[in-house]
Image (tube, rainbow, N blue to C red):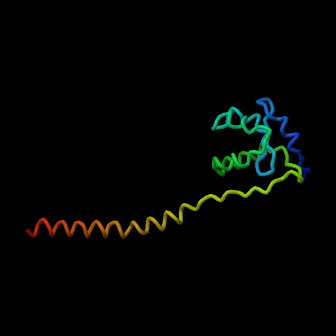
Amino acid sequence: MSEVKTYSLAEIKSHNTNKSTWIVIHNDIYDVTEFLNEHPGGEEVLLEQAGKEATEAFEDVGHSSDAREMMKKFKVGELIEAERKQVPVKKEPDWKTEQQDDNQLKQWIVPLILGLLATILYRFYFTQ
């Protein structure tokens, strides 16, 4: 197994052009030069973060697990230990449980209310 190459932020800072574009995400360094033209958000988004710490910008967009998997092939190293930051990973919301609870409530309350309204309207209009 080969040893991981480490770089300082000063070294990364010089890779901020479309000829050499490096970004730092979660203390890992990625050379995204070849990916500039393929990036779904456009190359400007990557060039804006070139040569910098881009973890917050990366997480704010909410990249998919496929995008995170794709990143691995662009990794060239890691940030030196002294310059690493503890960046919390944003937890993806668990929509399934919230949606399930909401759906279960709607499954019986909405029809019940509609049934009561229909009964009241029927009795009001047809018993007179």
Left or right of 106: which side holds 94? right
Measuring from the top left, give residue 123's x and y in whole percent.
15, 70
Question: Residue at the location (53% across, 66% down)?
Answer: 97
Give the mark count: 0
Q: Is residue 104 left or right of residue 37?
A: left
Residue displayed at 84% across by 53% down:
84
Left or right: residue 29 compared with residue 97: right
Q: Position of residue 43 (x, y in %)?
A: 69, 33
In front: 73, or 105? 105
**Whether residue 17 is situated above or below residue 80 in the rendered picture:** above
Residue reaching furthest to the left:
128
Residue 90: % across, % down = 67, 57
**Residue at left offset 76%, top offset 48%:** 25
Residue 38 versus residue 66 in the image, above or below: above
Tell me the quarter of the picture where residue 41 sits.
top right
Rendered-image quadrant of the C terminus: bottom left
In the figure, residue 88 lies in which quadrant? Answer: bottom right
- Residue 126: x and y in percent read 11, 67
Please tell me in which quadrant of the rendered image residue 30 appears: top right
